[in-house]
Every structure is written in C-alpha cells, then in structure tokens.
Amino acid sequence: MFCPTCGRENSRELKFCASCGTNLAAVSQALSGVESEGFLSRIDSALDQFIGRYAERIFKDASLTALDRGIAKSWKLFGQGVITLVVDLFLLALMWNVLPLRLIILLISTPIRLLSGRSQARKRVTAELGGARHAGLPEPSIGELMIGSAGSVTEHTTERLPEYLPPKQEQGLKAGHSE
C-alpha cells in the first residue's frame, strides 16, 4: 500500500507509514468503503487473521490474505486452514507412533552403546600402552623389582654421612674469623 502523504510503499501488515507515520489503517478503511466496523465484521476479521496465522506454516501468504477484505479471500483462507489441519492431523498420527518407538529403542540401546564405547576406549588405551612399551622402553627385570618393600628417601643418607665434607667456602669463612 502506498502512503497518501509521502508516497512511500509500505507492506499491508503495517498500521502506520514507516516514513512519515500516517495511519495506514484509517487509509485502508477509507479506501475499502467501510465506515465503521460492526461486531460481526470485527469477529470475521479476527477469525480470518487467526486462521491466516495458523495456515501460514504451510501457505506462506496466508496471513497477507487475511488482511484483504472480501468473501472470496475469506473462503480461500478457510480452505488453507482446513488443509493445514489435515496435514497437522497426519503428522500427529505419525509422531504418535514414531516417538514411542524411538523411546523404546533409546531405552534398550543406550546401555549397550555406553558399554560398547567403554570397552572400545579400554582397548584403545591398552593398545596405546602396549605399543609404547614395545616402542623402545626397556622391560623391567625381575631382580630390579623388590616385591614387598618400598624404597625410602632417607635410606641411604645415613650410610653416606661420614663421606660428607662441608663446602670449602664455609671453611674459609671459619678460618677468617679466627684471625
């Protein structure tokens, strides 16, 4: 629809001109010849807009058709609403059967898939560790492993205590103080 004030083209969904703010609903009402809408006319328009928004999921221009006044447009919109309802009922029946089947399959397959994933991960880790051990790392000999005893950090320090000599700097400082 063109604005009578500034001449800008606006979509039929706008109530006011995007450029100058003129009330396009009043202009549309004046052009259609309807002075004031009665109660039944308002209900008719509201139902057409509601059905248009519902049918818009399948028929993209349905909400635009709802804005057009006329008996032929109302019947066309009604037909689009019926077709949309039939498609929705078909999809409802289909999903009513598919969703429970999917739930049953998920309940059965989830534990199996989780266990399978864990065993594959263990096999992968075992293969990586086995490959690393054979990739040049020496095998520990049985003599090196002392079963039943654990080594200690302080185990050999007391044995080597008599070999300990204090650093030479400390000896030099002690000699300097005695002079």
Image (cartoon, rainbow, N blue to C red):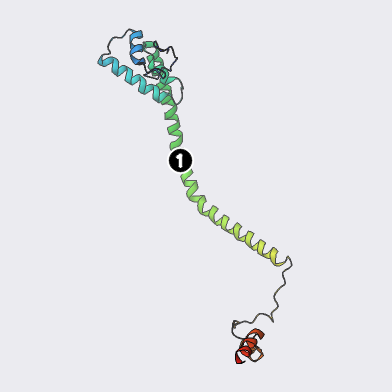
The residue tagged 1 is 99
Residue 173, horizontal then vertical, whole percent: 62, 86
Residue drawn at point x = 36 percent, y = 8 percent: 31
Task: Give residue 8's quadrant in the image.
Answer: top left
Taking the image as shown, residue 16 lies to the left or right of residue 97, namely: left
Q: Is residue 73 above or below residue 139?
A: above
- Most distant residue in the front direction: 179
Q: In the rendered view of the protein, which quadrant contains the N terminus?
A: top left
Residue 80, horizontal then vertical, whole percent: 42, 20
Within 10 Å of disc 1 (Cα), the crowding (few <14, some 14-19, many 20+) is few
Q: Is residue 144 above or below residue 36?
A: below
Q: Nearer the viewer, residue 58 or 19?
A: 19
Q: Is residue 6 above or below residue 127?
A: above
Residue 66, horizontal then vertical, whole percent: 38, 18
Q: Amino acid at mark 1?
A: Leu
Residue drawn at point x = 43 percent, y = 33 percent: 93
**Residue 31 visible somewhere in the drawing:** yes
**Residue 156 visible somewhere in the drawing:** no
Q: Nearer the viewer, residue 152 or 60?
A: 152
Taking the image as shown, residue 61 lies to the left or right of residue 44, namely: right
Q: Is residue 101 above or below residue 4?
A: below
Residue drawn at point x = 63 percent, y = 90 percent: 175
Residue drawn at point x = 28 percent, y = 9 percent: 35
Residue 149, horizontal then vertical, whole percent: 60, 83
